[in-house]
Image: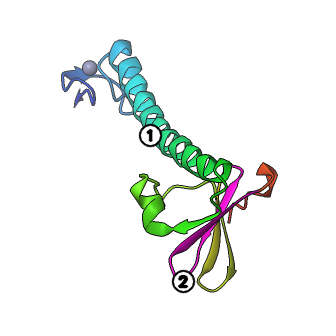
Amino acid sequence: MERTCIRCGQPYRGRSDKKFCCDDCRTEYHNHLRRERERGLRAVNRILASNWKILSAQLRAGHRRLPVEELAGLNFNFEVYTGCRRQLPGRRTFWCYNCAYRVSRSGIVHIWETPVENNAYL
Ligand SMILES: [Zn+2]
């Protein structure tokens, strides 16, 4: 039966479970998938590193409370974190590695340092 290679689109003949016309296409296809996965990881890692630098700099400067807009203005990304724990309804603590933070209803971000093993993965 004639099939079409899922990488190069060339027709080929082979077993029904074969997806590629040749080993090069199979290898290149899997390398491409791996590179895409790694690109996604690097993108998240960059955001986490940037967030961590922002929080650490605030702590070093002695700023433990600041308006959420100020953190957003530093390009802090609130969508990406290493841990999250809900204490009371609507009250969550987030972690970026060893930096914990919570946003109060009045829009103030409270930042503090914790041992990294206190990270909550909930
Ligand atoms: Zn091919």
Q: Residue at x 38, y 21 (%)?
A: 26
Q: Position of residue 30 (x, y in %)?
A: 42, 26
Nearest to the observer: residue 9 or residue 102: 102
Q: Position of residue 111 (x, y in %)?
A: 65, 62
Question: What quarter of the picture does the C terminus occupy?
Answer: bottom right
Nearest to the observer: residue 110 or residue 17: 110
Q: Residue at x 19, y 26 (%)?
A: 9
Q: CA distance from mark 2 to mark 1?
A: 30 Å
Nearest to the observer: residue 118 or residue 100: 100
Name the kind of residue labelled 2 in the image.
Arg
Quadrant position of ligand 1: top left
Residue 117: which numbered mark, if any? none
Q: Residue at x 36, y 25 (%)?
A: 29
The residue beneath circle 2 is: 105
Between circles 2 and 1, the one closer to the viewer is 2
Q: What are the residue bounds of the magenta stretch?
A: 97-113
Dot 2 falls on a residue whose secondary structure is loop
Residue 43: which numbered mark, if any? 1
Q: In the image, is residue 7 above or below residue 46? A: above
